Amino acid sequence: MNNKNNTHADHWDQEVDWIVVGSGGGGMTSALAAKHLGMDTLIVEKSGYVGGSTARSGGCVWIPNNYLVLDGGLPDTEELAKTYMAHTVGDRTPVELQHAFLEYGPQMIEFLRDHSQMHFEWSKGYSDYYAEQPGGFADGRALEPLPFNVYQLKSNFKYLRPPVMDGVHWTSLSLRGLQIMGGLRRHSAGRKQLLKTIGDTIKNVLTRQRMATMGQGVASRLYQSIIDANIPVELNTPLTRLIEEEGRVVGIEVAKNHKPLRYRAKRGVLLAAGGFAHNQAMREKYHPYPTQARWSVANESNTGDGINAGAELGGKLDLMDDAWWGPVS
């Protein structure tokens, strides 16, 4: 055992039940679930913003057999989803984890519906990526957030990570709507979507509503839920290492505004600090050449801190060459 992980073991600057490292969609959802279960919960965030790369994403979540697609008429089942994943993922990840995802994913969507501001709609027509495979659907299983007026965040709005493109809050444009509008030269649905977007933009500007959709919608809805649940978020508080005692992680060391502090987690620590999009050395180690951190639209604080902290304690790494690739020029 690394002795440095046990120095000053009796001194803690703060003690809670559950610590979440990272304030993206996954981290905030975990914090809400822990708080609902009665745990004293804390989120630590490296940057000065809440939302992580979720706030810069398309905001879709792929959860088979959820109540929204079923209510919408999609003939989905857990068995169909298992078949689809068997033909697309195969044994590249443990089957028991795939099945856990399929079992608990729909429950997560219902939990957020019942206990938070995080409300989704079915993005019908956003196809499964391999819809031709057994168990796939051309109408897709993707969900995206309902628009959210970010002015509801009031003074906390300034802490929401800004979107990649300025001005998107005025349009109310969903990811599915953006796809439809992309075909405006080919079909009338695209032209209708363009006119709707223009109308929504004018209405939102006149009524002073900044409607977040896509990743901004997910981040802002979850952030409002975190505020409603009185879950503290410590910004500018990067993780520096995990603290281990007798083979178990019992807390974290952070550098809050450059000051080293130790936080004890009586129930556990969740690493939800994202990947390593802006760590040039890790990109060169794991990704195809050439690669540049400046190409990424992920948030700039996404530098592999959680990955490296886990690896230092013997955590096994896998799929490090995998990413969600897309043109950004």
Image (cartoon, rainbow, N blue to C red):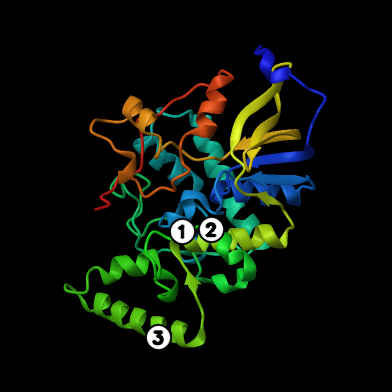
Vertical order, 123 against 99 (above or below): below
Contact flag, marks 2 and 3 (Cβ < 8 Å): no
The furthest residue to the front = 258
Left or right: residue 104 versus residue 140 is right
Measure the C-alpha gap from mark 1 to mark 2. Answer: 6 Å
Residue depicted at 49% across the width and 73% down the height:
211
Residue 115 can be seen, yes or no: no
Q: Which mark is residue 76?
A: none
Which residue is disc 3 drawn over? 202
Residue 158 found in image quarter: bottom right
Q: Looking at the image, is mark 2 or mark 3 earlier in the sequence?
A: 3
Q: Considering the image in quadrants, where does the N terminus appear?
A: top right
Report the amino acid beneath label 2: Ala
Question: Identity of the amino acid at label 3?
Answer: Ile
Secondary structure at badge 3 equals: helix
Q: Which residue is mark 1?
A: 215
Residue 219: numbered disc = 2
Q: Are marks 1 and 2 in contact (CB under 8 Å)?
A: yes
Q: Residue at x 22, y 69 (%)?
A: 183
Residue 34: % across, % down: 71, 46
Q: Residue at x 30, y 45 (%)?
A: 295
Mark 1 Cα shell of 10 Å, populated few (<14), some (14-19), many (≥20): many
What is the three-letter code of the residue carrying label 1? Gly
Q: CA distance from mark 3 to mark 1?
A: 22 Å
Q: Position of residue 68 (x, y in %)?
A: 52, 62
Q: Residue at x 35, y 78 (%)?
A: 197
Q: What whole-number distance in Å separates the C-alpha atoms at marks 2 and 3?
A: 24 Å
Residue 70 against residue 148 in the figure, above or below: above
